[in-house]
Image: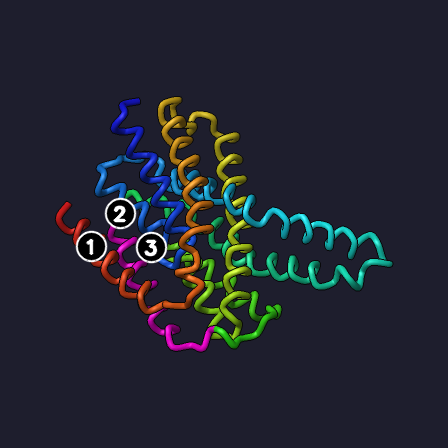
Amino acid sequence: MAIVDFLKYILLGIVQGFTEVLPVSSSGHVQLFMALLDVDVSENLLFQIVVNTGSLLAFLAIFAKDLVRLVQDCLNFLFRPSRRETAREGFLFVVKLFIATIPAAIAGILCKDAIDDALESYGTLLSGIGLLLTGTILLLVSHVRIRRGKTGITGRDAVFVGVAQAFALMPGLSRSGSTTAIALKRGIGLETALRFSFMMYIPVSIGSLLFAIKDFAEAPGMVPGAATLFSYGVALGAAAVATYVAYRLIFNAFRSGRLRIFSTYCFAVGLLSILLFMIA
């Protein structure tokens, strides 16, 4: 692997990681930088899943204590009646995460091939349109009083947020931005909305990874060559490190609630993506 290509894949992983924790669409930015760096990925959707897996590993590390507690609460609620009452809140939180994951899981199964084909033909165009939609969504909720919302998530809230996550399978439409925006519109406080949004990312990413593994197990000939797998692995590692660092260092920019700034940024990057598609 040439050193230039090696650096390109590291940069793509860094772009994925830094944009995953902000409401600016990591998939849209990865598509844009692939065009800017002239990186030709034969399995576009697979590459998106790989770099998202890097972010998944980072979130598993970030939320490790929360995940362990939730697993313990589920086990206690289901198998230890004496501890059921204290474990109820955690168990219900997991149920709501499961409810919120269903729409994206269905959409992913039904639309996987269509998304892959669309990315191959119209990657930067779709990303640009998605980024413009993201900017619009953030602008529409930028006036919401995000600090005084509810601290809990209802089952109905989980359905609405889950549908938003399903629509965010469209390249360029920010998953964290869409789900957080819907949660805010439903009166949920920013901290609660963000925590639920990032926790939702974990089961969806695990599901995408498992389906990719299943596809390759059924059709071994689809597995990319060693050089390609190595480049994808480089991008995965860079995405994991960048996601962790970005969450620790720049996530407060999202938490501050300055959604109008992110909205303006998405409009600018979206127009750039569309321009690149038109002149390519």
Mark 1 highlights which residue?
272
What range is drawn magenta here?
Answer: 124-146
Q: Does the magenta stretch include residue 138?
A: yes
In space, the residues marked 1 and 3 are separated at their CA atoms by: 12 Å
Q: At x 49% / y 74%, what residue is drawn?
A: 147
Secondary element at tag 1: helix
Q: In this view, does 56 lie to the left or right of 227?
A: right
Quadrant of the rendering where the C terminus is positioned: top left
In space, the residues marked 1 and 2 are separated at their CA atoms by: 8 Å
Q: At x 47% / y 54%, what residue is drawn?
A: 107
How does the figure colour the protein chain or chains?
A: rainbow
Do labels 1 and 2 touch, CB within 8 Å? yes
Q: Is residue 77 magenta?
A: no
Q: Where is residue 209 in the image (x, y as percent from the top left)?
A: 51, 40
For the stretch drawn in magenta, what is the main secondary structure?
helix
Compared with residue 219, is residue 50 higher up or lower down, i.e. above or below? below
Secondary element at tag 2: helix
Mark 2 highlights which residue?
32
Q: Position of residue 243 (x, y in %)?
A: 44, 46
Disc 2 residue type (three-letter): Leu
Q: Which residue lies furthest to the front in this view?
A: 249
Q: Residues within 10 Å of mark 3 (few under 14, many from 20)?
A: many
N-terminal label among 1 and 3: 3
Q: Where is residue 231 in the image (x, y as percent from the top left)?
A: 36, 29
Q: Is residue 206 left or right of residue 229?
A: right
